[in-house]
Image (tube, rainbow, N blue to C red):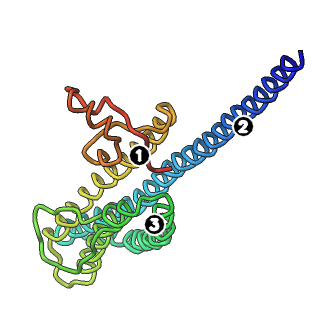
Amino acid sequence: MFSFIVKIIIEVFFAKVIGKFIANYYQSRNQFFLIKQKKVEKNAQSILDISKKITESAIGRRNAAVALVENLYKTLYFINRDTQKFHDESKKLDELRSNYRKEVKRWNKELTVINIDLYNIGLADTAIYQLEGVCDDNMEFVRPYISNGLHADFFKAHLFIVKYINSNEKNKEMLDYISEILDVLDKEMRNLSKKLVELSNEKWDSLSYNFTEPLSEDNYKKASTWILFIALFYTNPSLLRINSSEL
């Protein structure tokens, strides 16, 4: 009888201890999951906010540049054709230049903040190569124009705009080259925005897949030996998923 009671006490004791351990384990696990979830949600939203900020600032500066260049085209066309229209377009120049300078200052101010935001969420490469790029002061007409990064393209267009306005000899070729740069800028702006939206979507997807990512050439070193072994027999190894290392 005594041994039976002792056995019951031991069983109850261990049941409580083990039960408490299991409860604490899952509670800690759930808390960790919630922390990770909030971090991913915050990063995903931050990326969308940055994309919006880049797009708004870049569109403002590009549109101001396009309006200014269009005016320069018109004044060049009318200079020896229609004196009245030439003067009418020339009167608009000061206002267009003032608006362009305002947008340049706005972009430069936003650029510093955006760079910091990108670095803070681990997108330093995007900030360095796609947003900033490599600025140069080469004033040759290199065609076709190839993007050097969003800000570098703005800088290049700005150099040619200033050179054209300050030059006594006006030529359409320089305006054509500025327009070419602005067209490339538009494409690069859209590409950068698209990339950031895709990155944000990937973070949201990681929630659905419990913080895993598809096996790829970029992350195979993080995969376990067992996953790599299984991948040898898969016709499409990217269907396999491994733990994400971003968190």
**Kind of element beneath mark 3:** helix
Q: Nearer the viewer, residue 19 or 93?
A: 19
Q: Residue furthest top?
A: 1
Q: Work out how far the residue at label 1 is from the one at label 2, CA to CA, in angstroms.
A: 35 Å
Category of crowding for the residue at label 1, using alpha-carbon neighbours closer than 10 angstroms: few (below 14), some (14–19), many (at least 20): some
Residue found 63% across the figure and 45% down from its top: 35
**Please, is residue 214 above or below residue 85 in the view?**
above
State the image coordinates of residue 44 (x, y, percent, origin top left): 51, 46
Give the class, few, some or many, for how many residues have Cα within 10 Å of label 3's Cα (few <14, many ≥20). Answer: some
| Label 1 sits on residue | 199
Residue 31 location (% of width, % of height) = 67, 41
Which one is in front in this view, the residue at disc 1 or the one at disc 2? 2
Disc 2 target residue: 24
Q: Give 204 or 101, whichever is nearer the viewer.
A: 204
Residue linked to disc 3:
115
CB contact under 8 Å: marks 2 and 3: no
Left or right: 44 in relation to 133: right
Residue located at (31% from left, 40% from top): 225
Q: Earlier in the sequence, mark 1 or mark 2?
A: 2
- What amino acid type is highlighted by mark number 1? Leu
Residue under the point 33% across and 72% down: 90
Residue type (three-letter) at the residue carrying disc 2: Asn
Residue 107 position, x and y percent, is: 45, 67
Residue 241, which numbered label?
Answer: none
Q: Nearer the viewer, mark 2 or mark 3?
A: 2
Q: Earlier in the sequence, mark 1 or mark 3?
A: 3
Inspect this view and state whether residue 84 appears: no
Q: CA distance from mark 1 to mark 3?
A: 16 Å
Foreground mark, 1 or 3, reads 1
Q: Mark 1 and 2 residues: CB-CB less than 8 Å, in contact? A: no
Task: Give whichever of discs 2 and 3 has the lower sequence position.
Answer: 2
